[in-house]
Image (cartoon, helix red, strand yellow):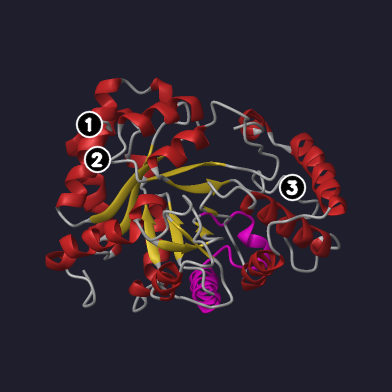
Amino acid sequence: MSDSISRREFGGIVAAGAAAAGVGAVSTARADEKDEKAKEEIKKTRSYNPEMKYRRLGKTGLWVSTVCMGGHWKRIDKVGAAREPAFSKNRAEVIARCMEVGINYIDACAGNEVMAYSKALQGKREQMFFGFSWYEEEMRNAQFRTTEKLLGTLNKGLKQSGLEYVDLWRITLHERGSLHTDAEMEEAMKALEQAKKEGKARFTGVSCHDRPWMTKQIEKYPKQLEVVVTPYTAGSTELPKDSIFEAVKKCDVGVFGIKPFASNSLFKGDSSPNSPEAEEDSKRARLAIRYILGNPAVTAPIPGLISTAQVDNVVKAVKEGPVLTDAESQELRLACAEMWERLPPGYQWLKEHRCV
């Protein structure tokens, strides 16, 4: 680990996180503005910026920005950064801008993302919380469904990336989590426990799209599932009952929402800076982020951002606040109707997440 966090100190960090968990007891995700103790804890978080809002990541006790950085970089060719050295320069600039504005969590879910962001964070590791998954060699691959194999993936990722620990190891499960056997889940939970015991992962969780099944897992494994990563788009609504968010609130689980823009289907343009639709698409992005922030059970949406301008745009959304006017709500509804129509064949499953 870095100079500021050693494995010998790891037990103390986890204990401190558990203590901080009580700080935000007023809500699963956000601190009461009147809670002075919470305010002081927030100021100690990584890359703190008083202009950013922060929410408590469930029982981890970490305070993360209300919008975080997703690992994907779709359409990065549209900003001229598809190849090296422009790609690495772009990732470094985007991460640096995130830290400047107070965005303090990066979610890397694939091998190339782990390598890219660990490189971008060289010399700045303690300024960002790092979420790790190397999905190619985790539970979606039938060859990696044992405790030994999963730990091997984590160890390999740490070695190749030069990371000594990760703040969150969230194993990527099959999209249809119900396809995993009980025995396979037991193996995964043992791997998460062992990684935490060895000081390689401060906190643990999973990523999955199968919400009814995942709700049962949250209740079955409250110790290991401190954080879950699941789709939550601009068109998602919470069910009046039997929602995954009932389990999230009950078990104090942090939630990162992926695909907030439905794989860019929300937008009319192609993300080029000079696109004639750029201004409207930026507004749509802000409306989507603000709408998602209206659900306090979602700790933070994690869009993949490909430029510093996009970073600044989501920060603007945070400042505008989660309450939409009637006109804005209608505008977003119309945009989402177009979004569902534009979904590519490989993302039709997102329609299942309109009610969660």
Q: Is residue 223 above or below residue 307?
A: above
Marks 3 and 2: CB-CB under 8 Å? Answer: no
Q: Residues within 10 Å of mark 1 (few under 14, many from 20)?
A: some
Q: Tell me the residue at 35%/32% (across/down).
A: 141
Q: Given the image, on which type of amino acid does mark 3 rest?
A: Leu
Q: Earlier in the sequence, mark 3 or mark 2?
A: 2
Which mark's residue is nearer the viewer, 2 or 1?
A: 1
* Disc 1 residue type (three-letter): Glu
Crowding around mark 2 (Cα neighbors within 10 Å: few <14, some 14 to 19, many 20+) is: many
Q: Which residues are magenta?
A: 72-101
Any part of residue 350 in sight: no
Q: Which residue is mark 3?
A: 266
Q: Quadrant of residue 67?
A: bottom right
Residue 198 visible here: yes
Quadrant location, the C terminus: top right
Residue that mark 1 sits on? 187
Q: Is residue 204 above or below residue 199?
A: above
- Residue 150 tag number: 2
Q: Amino acid at mark 2?
A: Leu
- Residues at discs 2 and 1 in contact (Cβ within 8 Å): yes
